[in-house]
Each structure stands twice: as C-alpha cells, then as structure tokens.
Amino acid sequence: MSARHHAVSSILAPLLLAAKETFAQGCASCYTTAAAGGTQTVHALRNGIVVLLVPPALMFVGLMIVVRGWRSSADTNPRVPDRNGSEDFDNLS
C-alpha cells in the first residue's frame, strides 16, 4: 500500500467511525418503535439479524471454497512450456 493510500485511510477511518449514523442510532422513530415493542420485538429483531446474516456468510464461505479449489488446481497443472525453448508442444501431457 502506498503512503498516500495509508494517509487517506488513516484520516478517513476515524471520520467514518465518529459519525453517529454509523452505529444506526440516528433514527429516533426506529429506536422508539423497537423500544416500545417489548420482548417479542427484541426476539424478532434478533432472529431477523441472524436470518439476514446467513446468506452473505454462506456466499463468503462458498467463494472461499471456490478460490481455494481454483488455487489448488492451478498448483497441480503441468509447467507451461517456454515459447522460446526447444520443447515440443505436442508431447505435453
């Protein structure tokens, strides 16, 4: 990472974390509705968070499996012949 990117990141990260909307507490209506709902609402919100977390987590795990399989298959491929060398391209297996 270049020094410029590092400087921009070190300035931008604290600014984003300092914003009160970053922590999703800026909406008074949402807070009031959730607080007035009682224990059933809290339970429903917690279940909703889990339900919304599962698809991205599964996609991430699936992508990591694909990348790992792609990487291991690339490691087992035979050596690519040198175009300037005297090897015969027809006899590669």
Image: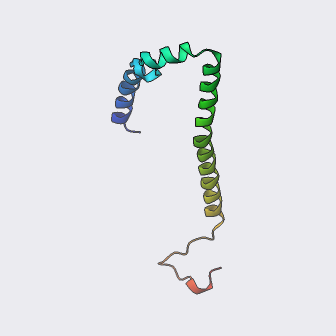
Residue 74 screen position, x and y as percent: 61, 63
Quarter residue 2 falls in: top left
Q: Is residue 56 left or right of residue 29?
A: right
Q: What scheme was used to colour the molecule?
A: rainbow
Residue 14 screen position, x and y as percent: 40, 21
> Is 59 or 39 nearer to us in this picture?
39
Q: At 39% from the left edge and 24% from the top edge, which residue is drawn?
A: 16
Q: At 56% from the left edge and 82% from the top edge, which residue is drawn?
A: 87
> Is 65 or 57 nearer to us in this picture?
57
Quarter residue 17 falls in: top left
- Looking at the rendered image, the quarter that the N terminus falls into is top left
> Is 56 or 2 nearer to us in this picture?
56
Quarter residue 72 falls in: bottom right
Q: How many marks?
A: 0
Q: Where 77 falls versus 9 (above or below)?
A: below
- Judge whether residue 88 can be spotted in this image: no
- Looking at the rendered image, the quarter that the C terminus falls into is bottom right
Residue 63 screen position, x and y as percent: 59, 50
Q: Where 91 falls versus 17 (above or below)?
A: below
Q: Is residue 64 left or right of residue 86?
A: right
Q: At 64% from the left edge and 20% from the top edge, which residue is drawn?
A: 40
Q: Is residue 15 left or right of residue 57?
A: left
- Judge whether residue 23 can be spotted in this image: yes
